[in-house]
Amino acid sequence: MIVRSLKQGLMKFSRIAWAVVLATGFISCSEREKPDDGKLRIVTTTTMVTDLVKVIGGDRMEIQGLMGAGIDPHSYVPKLGDTALLEKADIIFYSGLHLEGRLQATLEAMEKRGRNVIAVSDGVSPDNLLSPQEGFEGTKDPHFWGDPLMWAEAIAPVVEALAKADPAGAEIYQKRGEAYQKELTDLSTWAAEQVAQIPAERKVLVTSHDAFFYFGRAFGFDVRGLQGVSTAAEAGLQDRSKLVEYLKNQGVPTVFPESSINAKGISAVAAEAGVKVSEESLFSDALGQPGDLETVDGETYDQGTYLGMIKHNVNAIVKGLK
Ligand SMILES: [Zn+2]
């Protein structure tokens, strides 16, 4: 009898201890279970961040992205399995600047209790960040990957964190980072050449939400979104009629839906203003499916990569506006 109650007591204690572990995340890095192959476990949030870490980390680690293709990071609510994945990770990379609206508080809390949590936007020079319009005072526009040269600034925090966690691979990460920096610089040059085909008065980019201000600043577009900088707020009637008016006045030929947002809103505005809706959705806050190839002008690219995302967007915009 005594033995049995002792056993029950122990079981009860271990349940309580486990609950404390779950609540506080009180497991240190070394105690965390490693995969059999001894590789680092990396967890990433958006598809752009996942792609960046894969480019630099490659096959030296296990990389698990929480968000898939077409997923809107502003409204992403953590799934049941996400907490377990995050708790097991050696490093967590996220985009930051409140892009991951519903996840950012969780990530910041984990960082406070000593977990290795990195916002890749920390690599971006604060002077280059844009302040969004009304309603978002005190925050910065999170969509900095719209400009390939700004996305290149996110390479350094990834290289640094991976080199620190895996010093044996430091030289490899450094080299891959430098090579990718060059690819992004070339991508930016290519994009500038492509958009030069669009007449200056038609360089107007109207999309579902305000995700393209950095892209617009980099490549000379006047940018308007139906919804604001976060998709969390619905467009009001006033925003809508303003946008319809703008489309009519500017003689914009085409507006663009986005792959991670329902196209209903922007299509209704286009119909009201009497302008075309592009058959091609733009990738704004999520990449395409990995391995989803597209060929334009004899060049094939994977829309599930950041390089493919920008190529697809530029080609779609040139086609719609030139
Ligand atoms: Zn967005």
Image (cartoon, rainbow, N blue to C red):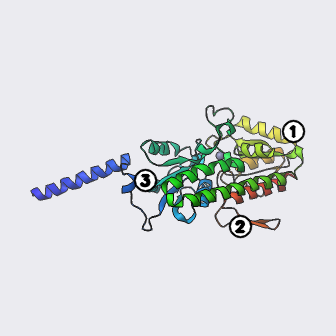
- Of tags 1 and 2, the one toward the viewer is 2
Classed neighbour count for the residue bearing mark 1: other residues with Cα under 10 Å, few (<14), some (14–19), many (≥20)? few
Specify whether 300 is left or right of 104: right
Specify whether 264 is left or right of 173: right
The residue to which callout 1 is attached is 249
Where residue 38 appears, as percent x and y from the top left, is 44, 65
The disc labelled 2 sits on which kind of residue?
A: Leu
User: Cα distance, mark 1 to mark 2?
Assistant: 37 Å
Q: Which mark is residue 293?
A: 2
Where residue 167 appears, as percent x and y from the top left, is 50, 57
| Badge 1 element | helix
Asked if the beta carbon under badge 3 is closer than 8 A to the nearest atom of ligand 1, the reply is no
| Badge 3 element | helix
The disc labelled 3 sits on which kind of residue?
A: Glu
Closer to us: 130 or 322: 130
Q: Earlier in the sequence, mark 3 or mark 1?
A: 3
The residue to which callout 3 is attached is 87
Where residue 161 appears, as percent x and y from the top left, is 53, 51
Q: Most extreme residue toward the left, as rendered?
A: 1
Mark 1 and mark 2 in contact? Answer it, CB < 8 Å: no
The disc labelled 1 sits on which kind of residue?
A: Asn
Q: Is residue 67 visible?
A: yes
User: Cα distance, mark 2 to mark 3?
Assistant: 34 Å
